[in-house]
Image: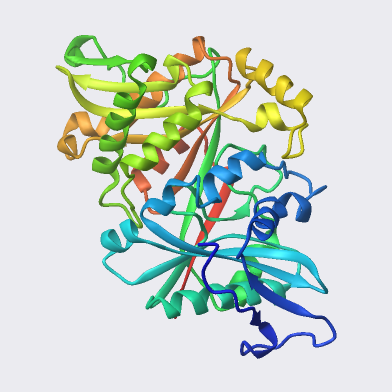
Amino acid sequence: MIASQTTNIDVSQAGFHMDNSASLTVTPVTDNRLMSIFITLPRHLYKGYKGYVPSLDIQQKNILHPKKSPFFKFGECRYFIAFKEGKPVGRISAQIDSVALKQWNEPIGCFGALDTIEDPAVVEALLRAAEAWLRQKGMKKIRGPFTLNFNSESGCMIMGQTAPPMIAMPWHPTWVGAFTEQAGYKKAMDLFSYQMEYGPQSSRSHIVPAGLTMGEGSLGQITTRMLDKKNIQRDGEILRSLYNNSWKNNWGFVPLTKMEIKSLIKELKPLLKPEHFVLVEQKGKPLAVALVVPNLYDITYDINGAPTLLQWAKLGIRILRHRFHSARVILLGVSSEIYGTALGAVMPALVISELMNRGKVLPYKTIELGWILENNTPMRRLIERLVPEPSKKYRLFEKDL
């Protein structure tokens, strides 16, 4: 990725109006210095904005760097940085996901990592650079933002900028979405995230039909188990298989690869407890699964992306003592084999109920369910019996090339 084309794109010749009094150029990332700027730029652009908490640089390297991200095992990507009067003022990625191309069966390229100052010319220049690269690669449509694919950080934040930040959920100021639309992009899909009360005080009575309890009565053959940390990669593969099986017919679905789940489990292992994993089985056969992840922002809120040695020690203590007060359900799936059955109809509620029961052990006060596709009416109705309105909304955009 870093060694490919090095020619700058002069936005003054890109086919749209700009202020000629300012020097605005878009430069492809071609070396480690530019890569470092690309990774750290959001925390410089958004410093001081209410609701924004920077991610750790090491986290972003795991997502973005070609030598660390599993995406580069099956995809290709080009990063661009916008400079105005020599100062970095925005960034974007353009990527081609071979797994998504096969699944979507359309020549759709993607963009992501779109972060900028409040300037529509900068947003448009970055988008034009991404479009040009994807067009050269034979793509007919552009979709995003994804960092770097559908199963990672997805969508542009449209609502919820001042809500508590959540692990693996992107943050954008309101102008990013507005300027993207101004650049000719249309809404493809909205994604919703719901924050609900968690712990012993939460109630399951609103979502589970009376008399239904796993391991009892008519559900006596249905059992649940927790994460087996000695066999965490095996449980990760069960999670991946059930997720792919259950979501394969949903809009925009891209299968989780074995490389992605292996990388995810490796990264999350220090944070996970057995109670974070819910596996529902019938006579040993997996029927449904969910994974809860502690919210890393709970322990990094006072650290600015690049911890000192002392701050790393502080983080280590916080992780060991599990000083998290919120968490996110990042994966939830029900086997397609029970779709259309009575059991299939109640299984999502049973899984969420089981997650709520874990609140007697886990220390969280709130749990976030997200993201949920706007057109996933059954899941939204289920969740909205507990939480009437989403706390955050993200938008995916599309444009013909």
The correct choice, above or below, for 399 with respect to 249 in the image is below
Q: Is residue 50 left or right of residue 170?
A: right
Q: Name the spot of residue 266 as percent of width and height, x first.
A: 45, 30
For the image shown, how many numbered marks are present on the structure? 0
The correct choice, above or below, for 224 with respect to 63 in the image is above
Q: Name the spot of residue 336 as percent of width and height, x first.
A: 20, 40
Indicate how the structure is coloured in the image.
Answer: rainbow
Residue extending farthest right? 21
Give the residue at x 54% y 21%.
Answer: 198
Q: Name the spot of residue 303 as percent of width and height, x first.
A: 76, 33
Give the residue at x 62% y 39%.
Answer: 58
Q: Is residue 181 left or right of residue 311?
A: left
Quarter of the picture holding the C terminus:
bottom left
Q: Is residue 161 left or right of residue 127?
A: right
Residue 70 seen anywhere in this rendered image of the structure: yes
Residue 400 seen anywhere in this rendered image of the structure: no
Q: Pick the residue in front: 253 or 163.
A: 253
| Snapshot quadrant of residue 290 | top left
Q: Pick the residue in front: 168 or 375.
A: 168
Q: Pick the residue in front: 112 or 29.
A: 29
Give the residue at x 43% y 46%.
Answer: 70
Give the residue at x 19% y 10%.
Answer: 217
